[in-house]
Image (cartoon, rainbow, N blue to C red):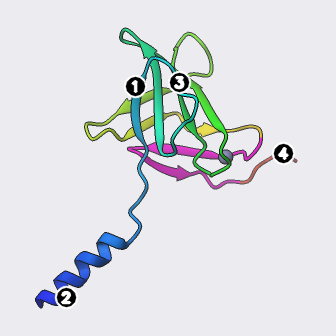
Amino acid sequence: MRWWQTLRQFFLRLFASPPVLIRARSVTELPETLVANQLYIVGEAGWQWYVALLCPCGCNKTLYLNLLPEQHPSWKVNVQADGTVSLFPSVWRKIGCQSHFWLKQGKVEWVKEERGQG
Ligand SMILES: [Zn+2]
């Protein structure tokens, strides 16, 4: 490969929009304004209470997901070494935008299925 092709590829990669990854941030109190593509793990002293994130569909609503196993529904959050985050099970908003997605290693995987509401 010629050097200018290498250079061209470099710039193409630089300016191509990279996949947006959601990263975790541990806080003891949820900030008033949430930043997109950031998942806030709210807890204290080793306890994780809930996570909050802006809905990735762009509707600008905050999603709150419980992490306490004794309350239902509850989610498991898994933070990778690079800060990207996975959630289990999937997130499904029953109101508003009705977003249904998996969060896997910072990537949003939309669940495309019929919304069976008859
Ligand atoms: Zn939404």
Pointer 2: what residue? 5
Which residue is farthest right? 118
Give the crowd class for mark 3: few <14, some 14-19, many >=20 residues within 10 Å: some
Q: Nearer the viewer, mark 4 or mark 2?
A: 2
Pointer 3: what residue? 30
State which tag comes first along the sequence, 1 or 2: 2
Which residue occupies 58% across, 27% down?
A: 65
Q: Is residue 79 left or right of residue 9?
A: right
x, y percent for residue 69: 52, 14
Residue 107 shown in magenta? yes
Distance (Cα) linking label 3 and label 4? 34 Å
Which residue occupies 67% across, 40% down?
A: 61
Quarter holding residue 74:
top right
State which tag comes first along the sequence, 4 or 2: 2
Q: Is residue 81 left or right of residue 2?
A: right
Quarter holding residue 91:
top right
Label disc, if present, on residue 117 of the rendered structure: 4
Q: Please report the bounds of the magenta region as a residue range.
A: 96-113
Q: Amino acid at mark 4?
A: Gln
Pointer 1: what residue? 26
